[in-house]
Amino acid sequence: MKFLGLIWINLKRRKIRSILTFLSIVVALFLFCTLQAVLETVNSQFKIGNENRLVVRNSISIIFDLPISYLNWLKSLPEVKSVSYTNWFGGIYIEERNFFPQFAVDPETFLSMYPELIIPEDQKIAFLKERTACIVGEGLMKKYGWKLNDTIHLKGTIFPGDWPFIIRGVYRPATEEFGDNMYFHWNYLYEKSERAANIGTYIIELKDTSQAANVARVIDEHYKNSSYSTLTQDEKVFLLSFVSLYGNIGLLLNTIGMAITFAILLVTSNTMIMSVRERIPEIAVMKTLGFTDFLVFILILAEAIFLCILGGLSGCLFARFLYNVTGFNASGFLPGFHVSFKTIITGMIVTVIVGFVSGIIPAWQSSRLSIVNALRKV
Amino acid sequence: MAVFTFINSKRFTKSIIMHIPIIYNVRSLIQRPVSTLATVMGIAIVVAVLCGMLALATGFQKAISSTGSPDNVIVMRDGADAEISSGIPRDNVNIIASLPEIANNKDGRPMFSADIVVIINIHKIGESKYYNVTVRGVSKNAFDLRENMRIIAGRSFNPGAYEVIIGSKLVGKYENCYLDGTLEYGQRKWTVVGIFSAGETAFDSEIWGENEILMPVFWGPVFQSVTFRMNDSTLFYKIKDKLENDPRLQVAVYRESDFYSKRSQALTMVLKFLGYFVSSIMAIGAIFGAINTMNSAIASRHREIAVLLTLGFPPSAILFSFLFECILICVTGGIVGCLLALPLNFVTTSTTNWQTFTEVAFTFHLTPGIFCAGIIFAVIMGILGGFVPSWRSSRQSIAQALRQE
């Protein structure tokens, strides 16, 4: 620890160089944390599923629906506590880019099955009473400047026409990852749609989670030879299948992350090499005074690591602070976007490694320096 | 104005005439190989990332937008934003098919296809997750609409048989996607009788069969879209008006090329933005690195600079010389970066087309324009990184510089 002062003085020797190196590490780690946070948010979006709930969908693919007649048989299964159903609406609010998910649901069973939606009791009653009512996430209210009891119009894409909805309730998602969606009465969809809407997915709440695999098998077996065969998965697995929609985004972000790491490695090692080259006579003097080769090695290495940690920590904290304050979520596409402690720790491990690698060659060179040769250069 | 005065001034003329030979800069770069190399590589990585991201965006855009032809018209239900959410009943299809503006092929048959479009789930080889793949049922003459479509193995499907042909990008990636493989969906077994290549378009990731045999398996008597070739593509707006105002129809009419390029716009924009955003932030780091390198290069050459000034080189010549040196480093880095990105041209990747939720495979596509963007980016980094150190070096006083050491 007593050498910390020495390291500090050495960094201050060429202030501009140290500051620029520091800043390039800050920038790099800021970017690194941002990309990692994007990756983490994308993955966590689909981890909100509950294993106690099963999702039944058409076995061909998610765009095919199921008949409403399945409801009664599903309800009759002894392991089943309650059954709800949803359908994807896919409406457009004014413009195509104002995207948010909309679901037609069976309101009573849905709300009782999803404690993730926190909604005041009076609003809940108002929503249940009225067929054209809907509830929306509080983030959407803020984004579009809606007020309670406003009527909003969506343009149907799957179900054509103009669809008015009255906002009777605002919910707060229990976890941010749950996101801001819109839910309305399935009956409204059924009655107003010209295509006589069916069921997109059935959601089943089980009495006993351990029966999940068993129940799923029973359901799929039962409908195997019907013209609407089913695929039953637990909600986690169901939602995970959407992760694949992001394609190779993980690979892409990780590749960029690697490139950034390599780039800062070059900048810092360049700095360390330049700074050691300038200090050759000084290192020789230190050795003359009795500093051992090993101590010189450690001092130079520590200087590189110290600079990296300083920059890396600032970059990580800056990223965390910036996204916290601005509440950035890519206009709703990345709900709950934030730089987690896990990301910061990953970032710090990377910086320490970068510091170590960039310092090791100059440190090794200076530890091997012979006093006579070095002093002769002056 | 000050700039023009400067250009017309004697000082500028003098600095042009009395320029320091370029070989001086090249030699001094070779003098310090390690730090030059580190800086060059730093710049190269930034340029490579930029080129890679732009190539990704361009490849995606190319795959989607080249799917459509400007001579074709695609008709969907009004309000539907993608084929899967559209539905056109058979009697409407017959009305559209009777348009006199539809071109005929060499056998005198109309170049016209009423498509069934559905999504099915297939496993990727070695993965347990499902992926969405488009199945398209087409009319017999659909191939006339696609000049770049070729059967590269096997044969086309026979009408009335449970046979399909698959796009070349599916082969080897998805389970059972090979010649004579059997796909199972809609309670039928489908034999893969052929593999087609559709020249880097989105069709290359699709499965095609006959529309009449696919229809009863899926939706019932509705088609998703109608595509036809116009005999005169300048008549597009006339055809559009005619169909959209027909009281018997509820359709939206698009030029096929416009329809597909609009579909690729959003993701292309996001990818391009991401490319510039990420590489700009990385560039800041690289510029700091370049400044460091130049500062140190100049610091070790104080006496040389003083000698140059004494010899009568004007300060502006020193400024240009060092600025040039920094730009040289960065352009070299830019070229290396472009070379690093080059192998990407052979990489195929896939992403979800968000409009249809299906997988689209495409190849990174590097264009001369992307390389230009990379080099220009490198030059900008050079100027930003080199200006301050060069300017400072040209302003130093001779006496002070010579006195050092």
Image: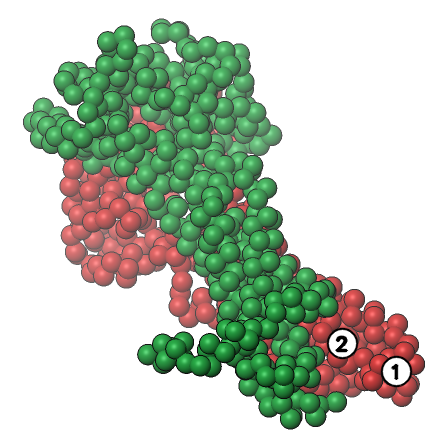
Chain colours: A red, B green
**For mark 1, does the 10 Å Cα neighbourhood hold few (<14), some (14 to 19), or many (20 or more) residues?**
few
Q: What element carries label 2?
A: helix
Q: Mark 2 points at which residue?
A: A276
With A90 as the anchor, is B157 left or right in this view? Answer: right
Residue at 16% across, 56% down = A150
Residue at 50% across, 54% down = B374
- Res. A125 visible in picture: yes
Q: Up-down: is A4 above or below A133?
A: below
Amino acid type for the residue under numbered disc 1? Arg
With B332 as the anchor, is B103 left or right in this view? Answer: left
- Badge nearest the viewer, 1 or 2: 1
With A100 as the anchor, is B43 left or right in this view? Answer: right
Amino acid type for the residue under numbered disc 2? Val
**For mark 2, does the 10 Å Cα neighbourhood hold few (<14), some (14 to 19), or many (20 or more) residues?**
some
User: Residue B332 versus residue A265: which sits nearer the camera?
Assistant: B332
Residue at 70% across, 92% down = B403
